[in-house]
Amino acid sequence: MSSLRDVAERAQVAISTVSAALNGTRPVAAGTRRRIEQAAAELGYRPNLLARGLQSKRTRILALLYPAPRSGFGLTEMQFATGAAEAARELGHHLLLSPENADPIEELRHLTGLGLIDGVLLMEVGLDDERAAFLAAAGVPFSMIGRTRDPGSIDYADIDFAATARDAVAHVAALGHRKLAFFNLSADAYADGYGPAIRAGEEFAAAARAAGIGYVDGHRPGSAEEGREAFERLMDAHPDVTALAVMDDHAAVGVIAAAAARGRRIPDDLTLMLVLSSAGVAEMFHPRLTTLEPPGTELGRLGARMLVDRLSGGGPPQQRLVPCRLVAGDSSAPPPVPGPAGGPREGRPA
Amino acid sequence: MSSLRDVAERAQVAISTVSAALNGTRPVAAGTRRRIEQAAAELGYRPNLLARGLQSKRTRILALLYPAPRSGFGLTEMQFATGAAEAARELGHHLLLSPENADPIEELRHLTGLGLIDGVLLMEVGLDDERAAFLAAAGVPFSMIGRTRDPGSIDYADIDFAATARDAVAHVAALGHRKLAFFNLSADAYADGYGPAIRAGEEFAAAARAAGIGYVDGHRPGSAEEGREAFERLMDAHPDVTALAVMDDHAAVGVIAAAAARGRRIPDDLTLMLVLSSAGVAEMFHPRLTTLEPPGTELGRLGARMLVDRLSGGGPPQQRLVPCRLVAGDSSAPPPVPGPAGGPREGRPA
């Protein structure tokens, strides 16, 4: 096994310089540091992190705990992970991607019991999140991407649903729309107390009220077929709706098909916005949909940074809300001019 | 700072049992282990992993090194990461999500120099991959999701492009198609020596030849606009093509729009397959596209398992190829019956 001395000899520097370079205890010129790291790699020298960890009781490893993806991870969840990994790395830390398996609390016990990690980053946070409760009780430093119903003094970075809803409502109101329908996430997500579903629902209603435009909600389609059915029911009950905000990507597929079947053209007859979906997904649609794109990378970065800050010392809680970015697509337009009866034109061939 | 003895007292077990539970040196009943982990967490007991690592020279941490996503990580890349994290966890290891930053070799030097990791998992592997060359030269255990041009004895799990192409060609041949066009990944990906682009191109050509059906390639659209243009050029030069395999999701959007503009209906006039795209993406299209779905989770799991096997001892190289799964959508149908002139019907209104 190679020693610190072997590394110092190969890199032609003092032992104290090797120690400083590998442990970060004082600045070392980039070229020198690189030579030392190369020598350490070539010699298979490794125990310094562990020794440093034993000494400082810090491993500089954070765990991003994520649930088993119900219907597969989406692009936004991926951005949480890569954003957090990048920020952690920039701040001299490393990020574990830690699946929760069946029992998230058991996994947390395992991770913290091992002494492997300095802190935890939670994502897919529920309004009443048992993981957050466990970590708070155990005194393990953590931050949240998302937030519980009552986050208290826990650091978090979450979507600003109020600003997002205001921007979306302002977008359609400026085009002249007078009545907006909102299709929330699936009934399952709503029933599970999934924060984004609950908050988006509340904030869209509030924003429409504040803007003085008509508003319809209560639909929660989670698939293309449910999107199709929800659109049919919506048009039967509220034929005067000319703008639609849809949370679930797959539901949007059904909405678009159902609109075409009814002869409602997008955007001529109907403005359609995807909410909390990426511009990459919106480009899959034809026409390209207007999107409220969640700041996935930024939230991931913020969550990791807050956690590192917390590990480095005290300070007041950091709680940040970031709005989605409105990316205008080809699915937004002024509403159609009302027909002779004052209602929308129905059944016109596309 | 709490000791092993404190944990043993709180959990009401012998010190040797605590050690066995936390270090995995012998089996401990699940209930007992949980009590010990809980006690360790409550007491903030942590140094065992580090001490164990110092003793065994193993940290049980693997790093998944990933490049800065050029156009954002896709769902398949996410599956590599989550699959690898799950398999690592099941095998008693942990997975770091390690961004490469500007210089992947410098990042590898840093990771290996720190003594943090036991091995590396590479993804987005180039035909001539400098990271693989570095790790092999440095003697760092690693495995690849994907593979270099000449992987030698390095463990890898990759897509079986030959079987994937055979399945795709057999799918359209069985429907009665006699001429297939293949739209590869963008010219950029091709020029970079990106394995999947090169291999898919070769294998589709070979499979079409073996099946005795006509074949057109050379198109490499990387966006909706390029997909539109490529389809126009294809139809001008080869109006008798009735089946199309497209690698780039965004190019497919342009192909579909261009086909509609030409009055070519999918699937009545044209069968369209997405290659190396997820069924989740295919469902965004209308009609839902037939897809050759890459085994992302399985490849991630295999890569992690091979690396853990390698770390646990010798054995011959493990090199596994897994085909994409053909998920039939609504974009596949027999080709149209030729019109009076023997060519395809053009310009028919949709």
Image (cartoon, coloured by chain):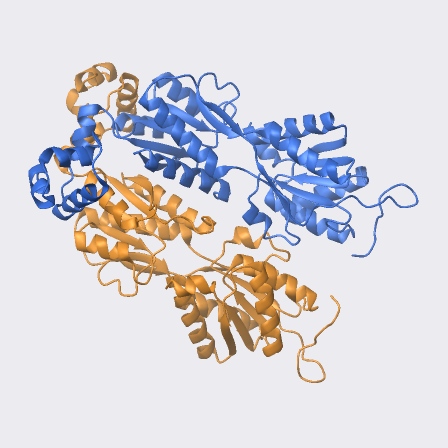
Chain colours: A orange, B blue
Q: Which of the two residues, B9 or A338, is positioned nearer the viewer here?
A: B9
The image quarter containing residue A91 is top left
Q: Position of residue B327 (x, y in %)?
A: 61, 43
Query: At 33% across and 44% down in the image, what residue appears?
Result: A87
Q: Is residue B164 above or below residue B134?
A: below
Identified at 81% across, 46% down, the residue is B336
- From the image, which quarter does the N terminus of chain A lie in? top left
Does residue B272 sit above or below A227 in this rendering?
A: above
Relative image position of residue B153 (x, y in whole percent): 45, 17
In this rendering, position of residue A20 left or right of residue B300: left
Question: What residue lies at 73% left-to-right and 26% top-to-bottom?
Answer: B209
- Quarter occupied by residue B278: top right
Residue, far bottom? A341
Q: How many marks?
A: 0
The residue located at (54%, 38%) in the rendering is: B294
Q: In the visual, does B263 lie left or right of B148?
A: right
Residue B314 in view, yes or no: yes
* Nearer-the-camera pick, B318 or A239: B318
